[in-house]
Amino acid sequence: MIRSVQPRHRARGARAVAASLAILACACALVTASAAEGPASAEPYRLFASDGRGAQLIRFARRAYLEAEGRGELYPPGPSDPSGRPAGPRDEPAPPSWPDRAAGIVLCLRTGEKIRACEGEVLPASRSLGEVVADLAERLVKSRSRGRLRPMSEPERRRARIEGTFVLDAARLAEADRDRRDLSPGWDPAKQGFRIEGSGRAVFIVPGEARSPRKAAAIARKAGVIRRGEEPAWFDRLTVVPTGEAPLVSP
């Protein structure tokens, strides 16, 4: 009996180690690239959000989310597809490209003032913006990034919104600042977020959600990223640009 279960434990352990190494490699890559190239320029990303491309990208993310939920029928097929198959991300116009060199992006699901979940990716290398967003939208459906996953009620679904945020830069937070109850001079909670990594996972915290590093750490503990008695492996302050937002259920 013992021999029969050992391989399973080894397999789970190997997967956990592999996930941890992937998270660590991603974090190291972002820090290295930021140091070598500096932050991504904000202006191309602001223009992206204001000229219609941001809205197009969020509509694509919404389609990907609904298809991952199995609710593609909320969008009836267009006249060019008489087959009756549900519409999905493939039916949208091609999503826009990165407005500048590839940075990071975070997708969040919000109901009213509450962030239900966020999933993000930094430095996606050669992956297209559409590929990254489709993957994040699919992960968002089952995300536990804000704790225990709870199904949305229909009234909540009608209030829910998909939001996107580009990550331009990540700055490592000094250990002395990680437990601050306030923000250091020069920090703007409306423009900066956090990324905390530990236990082989990462949680992204968007601007306005945590007004201090201590509050950000509390969100990470709720998500299981920081375990009791442990310190985060990485604690970064993020410089971001909003991408856009859209209702989850189109009116």
Image (spheres, helix red, strand yellow):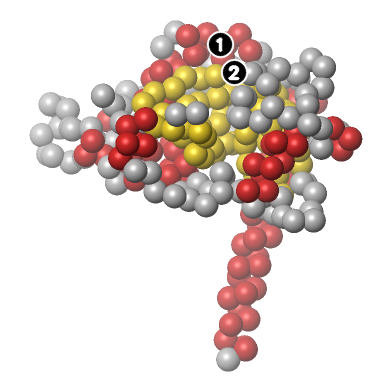
Label placed on residue 95: none
Which comes before the other along the chain, label 1 or label 2? 1
Q: Image point 52% across, 8% down: which residue?
A: 47
Q: Toward which corner of the image does residue 38 lie, by quadrant?
A: top right
Left or right relative to 90: residue 212: right
Quadrant of the image for the N terminus?
A: bottom right
Q: Return the residue at label 2.
A: 241
Q: Residues within 10 Å of mark 1 (few under 14, many from 20)?
A: some
Q: Toward which corner of the image does residue 72 lie, by quadrant?
A: top left
Describe the element under mark 1 as helix, strand or loop.
Answer: helix
Residue at the extreme right: 176
> Could you tell me if residue 90 is visible in this image?
no
Describe the element under mark 2 as helix, strand or loop.
Answer: strand
Left or right relative to 85: residue 53: right
Looking at the image, residue 93 lies above or below residue 75: above
Do callouts 1 and 2 mark residues in contact (Cβ within 8 Å)? yes
Q: Toward which corner of the image does residue 42 lie, by quadrant?
A: top right
> Could you tell me if residue 91 is visible in this image?
yes
Q: Amino acid at mark 2?
A: Val
Left or right relative to 122: residue 227: right
Q: Return the residue at label 1.
A: 46
Q: Image point 56% across, 11% down: which residue?
A: 46
Measure how far apart labels 1 and 2 are at the Cα level.
7 Å
Looking at the image, residue 110 lies above or below residue 151: above
In front here: 180 or 165? Answer: 180
Q: Position of residue 65 (x, y in %)?
A: 38, 38
Left or right relative to 205: residue 87: left
Q: Image point 56% across, 45% down: which residue?
A: 145
Q: Amino acid at mark 1?
A: Arg
Q: Image point 66% across, 30% down: which residue?
A: 210
